[in-house]
Image (cartoon, grey):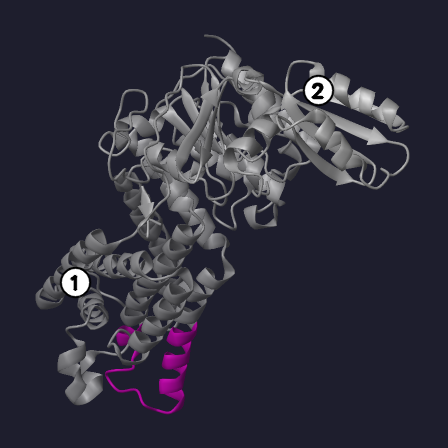
Amino acid sequence: MTGTFAPAPGAAPLVRQVLAQAGMETRLLLRNGEQLLLAVVIPLLVLVGAVRGASALDLDSQHTSVDVLTPGVLALAVMSTAFTSLAIATGFERRYGVLKRLGTAPLSRGALLGGKVGALLIVEVLQFVVIGAAGLLLGWSPDFSVPALVLAVLLGTAAFAGLGMLLAGTLRAEATLAAANLVYLLLLAGGAVVLPAEAYGGLGDVVSWLPSGALGEAMRAACEGTVAARELVVLAAWAIVGSAAAARWFRWE
Amino acid sequence: MTYGGKPAVDGLSLEVAPTTITAVLGPNGAGKTTTLETCEGYRRPHEGRVRVLGLDPVADHRALMPRIGVMLQAGGAWSGVRADEMLRHVARLHAHPLDTGLLMERLALHECGRTPYRRLSGGQQQRLGLALALVGRPELVFVDEPTAGLDPQVRRTVWELLEELRSDGVTVVLTTHYLEEAERLADQVHILDKGRLVASGSPLELTRGGTVATIRLVVTQPFPPGAPESLASALGPTTELVVLDQHSLQVSGPADGSTLAVVSRWCEDNDVLPESLTLGQRNLEDVFLELTGRETAL
């Protein structure tokens, strides 16, 4: 058969699909004003506010120095992208039939997830550049352990992404939007992400088992050149539980 | 297939020949979309067997999906994505996509390429949906209500495109509300009602089966009192007479010519001056209404 529409069906190779999907999702994330607010503006405000506030009030304790706060805000940035942004975006993709559409496109579930993870990592790198630069301007002097940092970011992303997908795949889009923002605020305030767990007194033991507390601690350790093994294990456990639950209960429509 | 215990599609059996256009026709709630979604692997039949290009739409999902194109009835795109960006993205997911610029032009979408999806009109969203179904150069496309709500000239553009698909070797299965669409495009028509197949055949086969003729009489003056009754008794019990309004009535009876003679003689005898007297040919709409019940509004 010849002609404009002569059939020549076939899926693109997996790698090309993953790259296309990651690029698309990154562009959409960066184009969305609310998502940018969550990804960059709020973490920057938290960082500058906490550092300035602490010095203005002469509270320069070990919990509020820029060396403790900057890794915590980086952890917050991971949480905002891997959990809140991902959950909201995926919730609306379900609602608008995007997942159904791409499924016939044909994008396999593996390629879709690969694309999403790729987009999360790209956005996180951009967040780290902006927040890290702000921290350095405020006097942050990190002493990175690169393997520890990479592990913390990857496991933290996996843990929050699993939970975000669980939320997005089980609730309506509006409920996902509300819940993802609420959880973000609660963890920002009380999840030991920006401030270390010790700052919470007796509650510290509890919150350090949360993915937020574990990620915050792992990031702080990595920026001081050490590996927080227990926290990384906690994150890995959350990643496994969250992904398994999402795989079990995620509804595509 | 059942929804909440009520069968949506029940005991449906139909086949589609390659490189043809098949129309699945039916009133709202007839099970058209459910039938399509079962073929697309979105739904698993509770009983029976579905094979699409020889594959099981659920078990062989990964193998089947690249070979078919699916146009959803609504949605399917991010709200902030631009029309051309969405089409290029889906093109990139395929091995040998069509030229997206050409497709945008063919579907009269080139002027709204930079418009975000949420700001496209309903008709533009629909045409983009069709473009997304075609861009991967499928062997078989399922299109759900391709022209619902489109302007007449855009509808014609879509029809020409679907006909070109067929001549280029693509098999098209479409659902539609529009009988003229099915009549013009389809090689085979399947009429569904309440989840059951009530008729199948080419438009010609479906409309030909006429042992009943319909005669429509329009008169210049309102009918005198009692006139319709006298015509009914002149025609006898084998015909059905329906008074449409004060000036017109419709008679359905044996297609043997005698009915027409009786009506014209009755006009002469009663000094009724016909404005028009037409012998109706059944069209798909008549067949459809006969099969799915006259109370069904399309």
Q: Position of residue B99 (x, y in %)?
A: 52, 23
* Disc number lying in front (1 or 2): 2
**Disc 2 chain ID:** B
- Amino acid bearing label 2: Thr
By secondary structure, the bulk of the magenta-drawn segment is best described as helix
Question: Residue visible at 64% across and 17% down?
Answer: B255
Secondary structure, mark 1, is: helix
The residue lying furthest to the top in this view is A1
**Disc 1 chain ID:** A
**Numbered tag placed on residue A238 in the rendering:** 1
In front of the other: A196 or A51? A196
Q: Is residue A12 visible?
A: no
Q: Where are the magenta residues, as a range?
A: A45-69
**Numbered tag placed on residue B259 in the rendering:** 2
Secondary structure, mark 2, is: helix
Quadrant where the image shows the N terminus of chain B: top left
Question: Residue visible at 39% across and 60% down?
Answer: A88
